[in-house]
Amino acid sequence: SQTIHQWPATLVQPVGSPLSLECTVEGTSNPNLYWYRQAAGRGLQLLFYSVGIGQISSEVPQNLSASRPQDRQFILSSKKLLLSDSGFYLCAWSVNRENTEAFFGQGTRLTVV
Amino acid sequence: AQTVTQSQPEMSVQEAETVTLSCTYDTSESDYYLFWYKQPPSRQMILVIRQEAYKQQNATENRFSVNFQKAAKSFSLKISDSQLGDAAMYFCAYRPWRSNFGNEKLTFGTGTRLTIIP
């Protein structure tokens, strides 16, 4: 069966420090991968998605970047965190065909101080 | 661009009663998917129910059912016999039919927080 791992679960970082959140998927190949952010009291905002290795699409301009160095690995990064980067980050994957939903990791609570 | 609107930030229901959560969406596509996700306090996103736009029959999953009105672009979730474990944030989501490269992404509404009153 497929599983998705996302870490760390919580993170407190000072303003201006770098960020690296990692997400890996097991049990499937060539998944679509997504990074979402959920701000307090708001819905989920799609940040990045990837349909293959090295293929990254950005949905909103921001202080973050994403990379997909391997088929089932998706990394969210920042060189210098801002206070506004605080939030709950969710990684998700879906199978690359029509009739499917997205499956989510357990999320990372990021607090920038 | 597709948008998803959930106009009820909060709802509450008595245990064992029925509650309906509203969702509307905007799209120019004729084929797509709609989903309801549940996010309990653990923050884990859990799929509740899925509807394919080409299907006229409303999807059901045990106590959960939807009222899909394609012409009105409405997709409400009905929870029957509400239980304490149903307390969560509920998100409506839209996904286009996979016809073009990279358009499989989900668009979410802002969510409805459901409280179950014992």
Image (tube, rainbow, N blue to C red):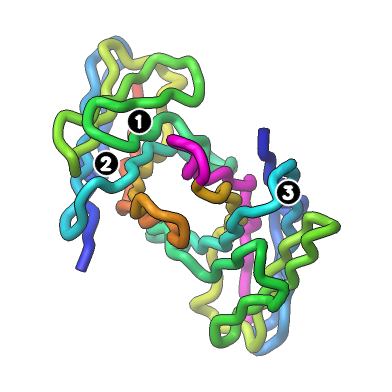
* Residue at the front extreme, as displayed: B99
Q: Are marks 1 and 2 in contact (CB under 8 Å)?
A: yes
The range drawn in magenta is: B99-118
To which chain does the residue with label 2 belong?
A: A
What residue sits right under mark 1 in the picture?
A111
Helix, strand or loop at disc 1? strand
Label ID, residue B25: 3
To which chain does the residue with label 3 belong?
A: B
* In the displayed structure image, the side of residue A29 where residue B61 appears, left or right: right
Helix, strand or loop at disc 2? strand
Q: CA distance from mark 2 to mark 3?
A: 33 Å
Q: Which residue type carries mark 3?
A: Tyr
Residue beneath the point at 74% across and 72% down: B67
Picture coordinates of residue B17, whole percent (x, y): 71, 86
Q: Quadrant of residue B71?
A: bottom right
- In this rendering, the answer to whether B72 lies above or below A6 is below
* In the displayed structure image, the side of residue A1 where residue B23 appears, left or right: right
Q: Quadrant of residue A75?
A: top left
Closer to the camera: disc 1 or disc 3? 3
Which quadrant: the C terminus of chain B?
A: bottom right
Q: Which residue type carries mark 1?
A: Thr
Q: CA distance from mark 1 to mark 3?
A: 32 Å
Residue beneath the point at 72% across and 73% down: B56
Q: Magenta segment: does it hold B113?
A: yes
Mark 3 crowdedness (10 Å alpha carbons): few <14, some 14-19, many ≥20: many
Q: CA distance from mark 1 to mark 2?
A: 8 Å
To which chain does the residue with label 1 belong?
A: A
Q: Magenta segment: does it hold A87?
A: no
* First along the sequence among labels 1 and 2: 2
What residue sits right under mark 2 in the picture?
A10
Residue beneath the point at 17% across and 60% down: A27
Q: Which residue type carries mark 2?
A: Thr
